[in-house]
Amino acid sequence: MARTRRGLDYFDPQFHLPAVKLLPGDFVATHADSLLVTVLGSCVAACLRDPVVGVCGMNHFMLPQSSSVTTSDSLSARFGVQAMELLITEMQKRGARRDRLQAKVFGAGKVLDGMNVVNVGELNADFVRRYLDLERIPIIASDLLGDSARKVYFFTDSGKVMIRRLNTAKVAKLVLRERQYRERIAGADWQGGIDLF
C-alpha cells in the first residue's frame, strides 16, 4: 500500500477485514482486499477504482486548493488538486489506467453553525465534481453536502461503499481532531477565522 502521512492500520472487528483509517491529508492506493475508512465533515473523500485490475484508492482533502503556492503545497494531499493527482499517480503505478477509473465521492457537509460566509463544503463539492468531469472520470455514486458528518467505509475487494451518518457527539470529536490538524500545519496559508473540518 502507498500512503501519505500516517494512515492508521488496524483490524476492523465489525467487518473482519484489515483496514486503514485515513486522516485529513492522507491518501491510500492498494491492490489488497481491505477496508479504507475515514470520517468527514466539510472535507471530501474520493474513492477511486479501476474495475479491470482491481486497484483502488481513497483520499481525504480539506480544501480545493492552496491560496498561495509553495513547494510544500504542491506535494500536500490536504488540498484537492494535489490529493487527486497524488492518488491517481499511485494507482497508475499499481496498474490502474486513468481512462478506466470510476469515482465515488463523499462529504462536504455543513456541520458547524457560523459557516455562512464561506461554505467550505460547497467549495469542496464543486471542486471534486469539476475535477472529475474535466478528467472524464465518471462519478458512479455520491453523497455530498447536507448537514451531516459521515463515516465512510470503502471495501476495496468489491468497490462497495457504506456511509454512516454521525451523531452530534462524534461531530464534536471530529471538529477537535481536525482543528488540531489545522493548527499543526498552520502558518503557510490558513487565513481568516474559518473553522474547517
Image: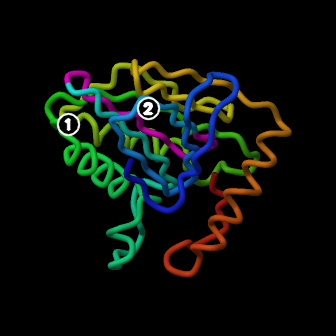
Answer with left or right where residue 2 lies relative to residue 143.
left
Answer with left or right where residue 42 lies relative to residue 50.
right
The percent position of residue 170, horizontal first and vertical second, equals 79, 39
Q: Residues within 10 Å of mark 2 (few under 14, many from 20)?
A: many
Q: Residue at x 39, y 47 (%)?
A: 1
Q: Residue furthest right?
A: 169
The percent position of residue 23, horizontal first and vertical second, equals 58, 52
Which residue is labeled 1 in the image?
96
Asked if the magenta segment contains residue 49, the reply would be yes
**Which quadrant of the view contains residue 41?**
top right
Colour basis: rainbow
Q: Which of marks 1 and 2 precedes in the sequence?
A: 1
Q: Helix, strand, or loop for circle 2?
A: strand
Looking at this view, is 11 or 132 the one in front? 11
Q: In whole angstroms, how far apart are the C-alphas of marks 2 and 1?
A: 18 Å
Looking at this view, is 7 or 173 the one in front? 7
Q: What secondary structure is the stretch in magenta mostly built from?
A: strand
Q: Mark 2 near mark 1, Cβ–Cβ under 8 Å?
A: no
Judge whether 144 appears above or below 3 on screen.
above
Judge whether 69 appears above or below 163 on screen.
below
The amino acid sitting under disc 1 is: Ala
Looking at this view, is 193 or 79 the one in front? 79
The percent position of residue 191, horizontal first and vertical second, equals 57, 73
Q: Which residues are magenta?
A: 38-52
The amino acid sitting under disc 2 is: Val
**Which quadrant of the view contains residue 195?**
bottom right
Which residue is labeled 2 in the image?
105
Q: Residue at x 36, y 40 (%)?
A: 30
